[in-house]
Amino acid sequence: MTLTTPSAKLNSYRAGPDDRGFFGLYGGRFVAETLMPLILDLERAYEAAKADPGFSAEIAFLNTHYAGRPSPLYHAERLTDHFRAQSKTGGGAKIYLKRDELNHTGSHKINNCIGQILLARRMGKTRIIAETGAGQHGVAVATVCAKYGMGCEIYMGATDIERQSPNVARMMLLGAKLNPVTSGAGTLKDAMNEALRDWVTNVHDTYYIIGTAAGPHPYPAMVRDFQSVIGRETREQMVALEGRIPDTLVACIGGGSNAIGLFHPFLDDKSVAIYGVEAGGHGIDIHNGHAASMTGGTPGVLHGNRTYLLQDADGQIEEGHSISAGLDYPGVGPEHSWLKDSGRVTYVPATDTEALDALKLCTRLEGIIPALEPSHALAYVTKLAPTLPCDNLLVMNLCGRGDKDLFTVAKALGIKI
């Protein structure tokens, strides 16, 4: 295993990672020696692509004409009025929803997959593998593979296959080979383990599209860069609508790609308060009952990077729980761990019940059914918004559609279908 150590401190919140892939004490490349040449090849290819104006231009074209960007920044008037009616101080933030669920494939995941499929093609790879939890990343990977005629295999936990059947059907319709993972709890962690094993075995023709801002360097920074279109658009749209940037940002956190995509362009704006919302599951005090690694975890190494993890005293990874398959991961991207320790971003949990209540509220008041992942972010907005003044501009990233979760939600709420 190759262990790298952090170098100099970063001089701004947007400057990371350092040249060895660290955000402070977090990140790096903790990988088997057989995998290290692939990681270094990927880093060189990505640095060359970033320097090529044609690469950026192709991404911009596909974001507009294929993915459907920019996604709208929507003033949620009825949610705003609801929270203002609840305010004990006569306040209540003005709520905007960054509607990334309107992207092609139904979530923010397509932003990253467009960038990585173009990079894979530049590198001459012909076979794509990926892990998926909620299935949104798997659908986005299968989509770009279908567009470019590339072989595609998706690793997905057996538990997630059962609770995310609509996305399973989409992946298969798109031509992906689905590999069920039965080890562990059969969730996202286990799917990522199997995908990494595949990558080591098939080094010559295979490219691994990691779906979240985690894994060995350069993945956390690369995924963040592709997802930062969310925050850049939000800044431009809010200035156009309100004449200034937002005061408050809120997004859900699993691995953390949608959140870092919204947060990163604002990290050096000290006036902007930022909140990441983890999966509190059945409750933070319940062993194996949540997936809030930054609230209830400690630093350790998993999937090639050092970050906050749910682990026991011996460093063994524990199973997380969330009603949301996309947040059911016992770790988080390393940049989020650094932002937690630095105090720049505040991380809080939301329980399964709170997320379901928020989902119902958004559906009934705005006619928008959010996925269970952003419903966790909205659950915290229900607590935060009434405490803020009326002139506070709050943006929440609505990063996924609720179509995929209808069976899970119906079962949880006792709705017979």
Image: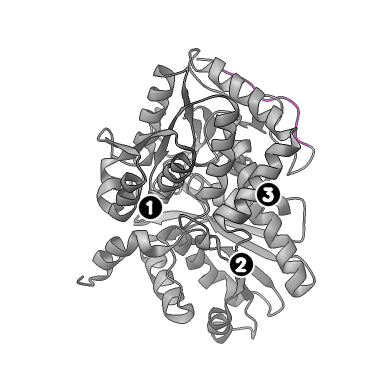
Above or below: residue 217 compared with residue 389: above
Locate residue 214, reporting x and y percent.
53, 37
Q: Please state the extent of the stretch shown in magenta in the rendering.
A: 3-10
Mark 3 or mark 2, earlier in chain = 2
Residue 59: give its label.
Answer: none
Residue 285: give its label.
Answer: 1
Q: Residues within 10 Å of mark 3 (few under 14, many from 20)?
A: many
Q: Secondary structure at mark 2?
A: loop
Residue at 45% across / 42% down in the picture? Answer: 141
What's the amino acid at mark 1?
Asp
Tell me the quarter of the picture where residue 318 sits. Answer: top left
Closer to the observer: label 3 or label 2?
2
Closer to the observer: label 1 or label 2?
2
Q: Residues within 10 Å of mark 2 (few under 14, many from 20)?
A: some
- Given residues 71 and 311, the one toward you in this image is 71
- Is there CB contact under 8 Å for labels 1 and 2? no
Locate residue 207, reporting x and y percent.
49, 28
Q: Secondary structure at mark 3?
A: helix
- Given residues 123 and 292, the one toward you in this image is 123
What's the amino acid at mark 2?
Pro
Above or below: residue 400 compared with residue 361: above
Closer to the observer: label 1 or label 3?
3
**Residue underneath mark 2:** 72
| Quarter that holds the C terminus | bottom left
**Residue underneath mark 3:** 264
- Given residues 316 and 222, the one toward you in this image is 222
| Predominant SS of the magenta segment | loop
Q: Secondary structure at mark 1?
A: loop
What's the amino acid at mark 3?
His
Locate residue 295, reporting x and y percent.
49, 49
Q: CA distance from mark 3 to mark 2?
A: 19 Å
Mark 1 or mark 2, earlier in chain = 2
